[in-house]
Amino acid sequence: MEFEYKEVPEKDKLAVFELIDLVISSLDDPSCFIPYEDWEYERMFDKSYAYLHGAYVDGKLVGIAQLYVEEKMLTDARKMLKLYDCKLAELGGNLVDPKYRHYGITTTLIRLQIDLAKRLGFECVVAYTHPENKAMNRVLAKLGMKYIDHSIICDIYPRNCYLLTNSI
Ligand SMILES: CC(C)(COP(=O)(O)OP(=O)(O)OC[C@H]1O[C@@H](n2cnc3c(N)ncnc32)[C@H](O)[C@@H]1OP(=O)(O)O)[C@@H](O)C(=O)NCCC(=O)NCCS
């Protein structure tokens, strides 16, 4: 199958929201994805907050990923990792239409975002995933991210924490 990978333009906002609804409503374990809050939908295309990339098949959006760059989003990660000096970004918002999983979409989107982080001058990239989310743990490890620790996020979400440092 042929996929096109690109930054998602704002005109595809509805497709983004529909994809989020589809994936969240079909999760086997809802705790695998921390639901978006209203302000996150509003800032979906605001690059001072996050870069949004997508995978398309014949013009249809089938997967997304975000690279969070806003410093205030990274306070908890900095505390947990004791990383106060490096320029840090966070990967997240990884969602793929169930019909298009296991084709390497998330692997490609995250690779693209790590390259972007590097071009933007970031020195470290952090990512979190549910300990039982086998696909996401696999993707992060496969991309060379190092498992750091396990913690509880937002009081209720168990998460593995991965970090990519100087090599980015
Ligand atoms: C997690 C998710 C984004 C992965 O997307 P994807 O495009 O299918 O991922 P990829 O195809 O790039 O890679 C998946 C990898 O996990 C592996 N994998 C998938 N399911 C697996 C399982 N049950 N056990 C072990 N490995 C598994 C695949 O084999 C592949 O590894 P490989 O390339 O070495 O073979 C997708 O499953 C999804 O949308 N899940 C629901 C939302 C979610 O949990 N998001 C992540 C929040 S942190």
Image: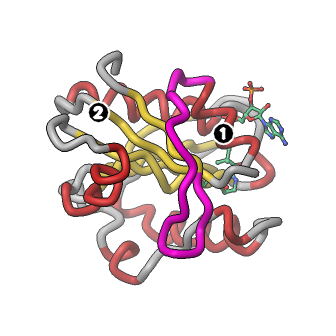
Measured along the vertical axis of the image, is residue 97 above or below residue 103? below
Query: With 100 as the anchor, is 165 left or right in this view?
Result: left
As shown in the figure, which amino acid type bears the numbered disc 2? Answer: Ala
Q: Is residue 77 left or right of residue 16?
A: left
Tell me, for residue 137, which label it has, or none. 1
> Residue at image x 80%, y 50%?
99
Tag 2 and tag 1, C-beta contact below 8 Å: no
| Magenta span: chief secondary structure | strand
CB at disc 1 and ligand 1 closer than 8 Å: yes
x and y percentages locating residue 16 in the rendered image: 51, 64
Q: Earlier in the sequence, mark 2 or mark 1?
A: 2
- Residue 136 lies, with reference to residue 46, above or below; the image says above
Residue 128's x, y, as percent? 52, 49
Q: How has the structure been colored for display?
A: secondary structure
Q: Is residue 162 left or right of residue 83?
A: right
Picture quadrant of residue 95: bottom right
Query: In front: 117, or 138?
Result: 138
Q: Where is 43 relative to 57, above or below?
A: below
Find out whether residue 143 is within the magenta segment.
Answer: yes
Question: Three-letter amino acid code at disc 1?
Answer: Asn
Q: Which mark is residue 117?
A: 2
> Which quarter of the rendered image does ligand 1 occupy?
top right
Most foreground residue, 85 or 7: 85
The image shows residue 49 at horizontal and vertical percentages of: 24, 59
Which quadrant holds the N terminus?
A: top right
Q: Crowdedness of circle 2 by 10 Å Cα count: few (<14), some, many (20+)? A: many
Choose mark 2 or mark 1, whichever is in front. 1
Residue, x 29% and y 53% (percent of image)?
79
What SS does tag 1 mark?
helix
